[in-house]
Image (cartoon, rainbow, N blue to C red):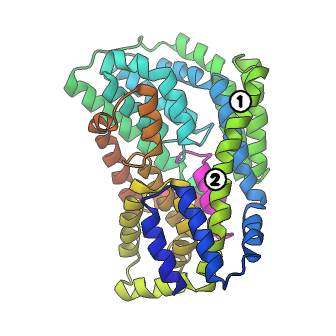
Amino acid sequence: MSATIIIAFMLLGLLGMPLAFALGFSSLAALAMSGNFNMLPQRMMHSVNAFPLMAIPLFILSGEFMVRGGLAERLIELANAFIGRVAGGLAQVTMLAGAGMAAVSGAAVADASALATVLVRQLSKVYGVGFSAAIVAAAANLGPIIPPSGAMIVYAYMAGSGVSVAGLFLAGVVPGLLLTAGMMAIIWVMSKRRGYPLTGEPITLRNIAYQMARSWMILLMPVIVIGGIVVGAFTATEGAAVAVVYSLLVGFFVTGKLKLSDLPDCLLQAAITTAVVGALIAFASAVTFLITVDLLPAKLSEAIRAFTSNPIVFNLLIAAMLFVVGMFLESNAAYIMLVPIFHPIAVAYGLDPLHFGFLFVFNLVLGMLTPPVGVVLFVVCGVANIKMGEMMRHLWPFVVCGFGLLFLCMFYPPIVTALPRSFGY
């Protein structure tokens, strides 16, 4: 009975705010446990008192330091040196800069804020505000796909010891690069068809060498952090701490744009974001416990297996469900509520945990670009001062490209799993 009530509340909760229905879930769980409210705070505290979760606030703080430290501007100038005068040149630069920001921040919202603030006005002079906003949103959405990724950390924690953070990071490398290339191809085609003027300067080795000399320390950061995690030199949490120190040093001594007066605001913004994620995890812990006690994964697995025994059909069902969930539900809430349910079922189907985990994350990341509750859309629309409908007219080809790659990864797993397997994951 309790499992049925939870599923009903989950469907109703899609129409509300994540924290609100997470709190409602926790209250429901307490009532379902015969009014034993003493267990609720213990479960909540235990759920957030975890060493792996410390990586989330540290990566968030690192991203804040990077944005304030002017790393986005350096990466844009470097990307511009490699693009030159091609169709959609400035838009291509934005996409490459988004990939570069993803490799040092791992958060779509932070990347969207940085790229929109720096580039939307400049892009709008060439392409118009609608296409410019769409380019920035698509570029920022690379953040949780290309490692490091806060979304992958949350998924790995909610899935348990069967999924490695480092393995998920590696799983995102090839799809992230393919998605970047695919969206750059779309920009080229759309720019040709619409007759956008050429921008930028011709490619010169001198300019490339100059920009590389200015940016090599920024590019070294993902190599140190992600490489250290992958080879086992440190954990994801320790790697996040390294990222914080590294971003501070780069902001203070390389770009020179990070000031001591910026630190309190960076800490405050990181604390607010971390508090939201932590509250979601804590409030959802009671529901997760109730789901486990009530054997909901086993019951749901039996129901799905009665419907189909084909793992591919199961993946398609999950993809369809997550597409709808991504339209209405904030992604962190979706990971916390749904991963404990569907990860065990995927394992029971014999699916590769890394492969399924990446598809799960990728699907919800694409949901950040689908209205009505796409957080990246809200950020870019706010900075660009544009209505969401106007931006979506230009954004849909990039969303289609993302879902096309999702299905390609689903039906050809080596795109996702080959690199992690080569490192022993």
Q: How far apart, in angstroms, are the residues tagged by discs 1 and 2?
A: 19 Å
- Picture residue at 37% right of the left edge, 60% below the top: 324
Q: Nearer the viewer, residue 248 or 295?
A: 295
Q: Nearer the viewer, residue 268 or 152?
A: 268
User: Judging from the image, what secondary structure is the residue with disc 1 in?
Assistant: helix
Q: Is residue 23 left or right of residue 302?
A: right
Magenta stretch? 145-167
Against 299, residue 164 (above or below) is above
Q: Is residue 157 left or right of residue 302?
A: right
**Mark 2 belongs to which amino acid?**
Val
**Corner quadrant of residue 22:** bottom right
**Mark 1 belongs to which amino acid?**
Asp
Q: Is residue 28 magenta?
A: no
Residue 265 is marked as 1
Q: Is residue 160 magenta?
A: yes
Q: Nearer the viewer, residue 223 or 378?
A: 378
Which residue is labeled 2 in the image?
277
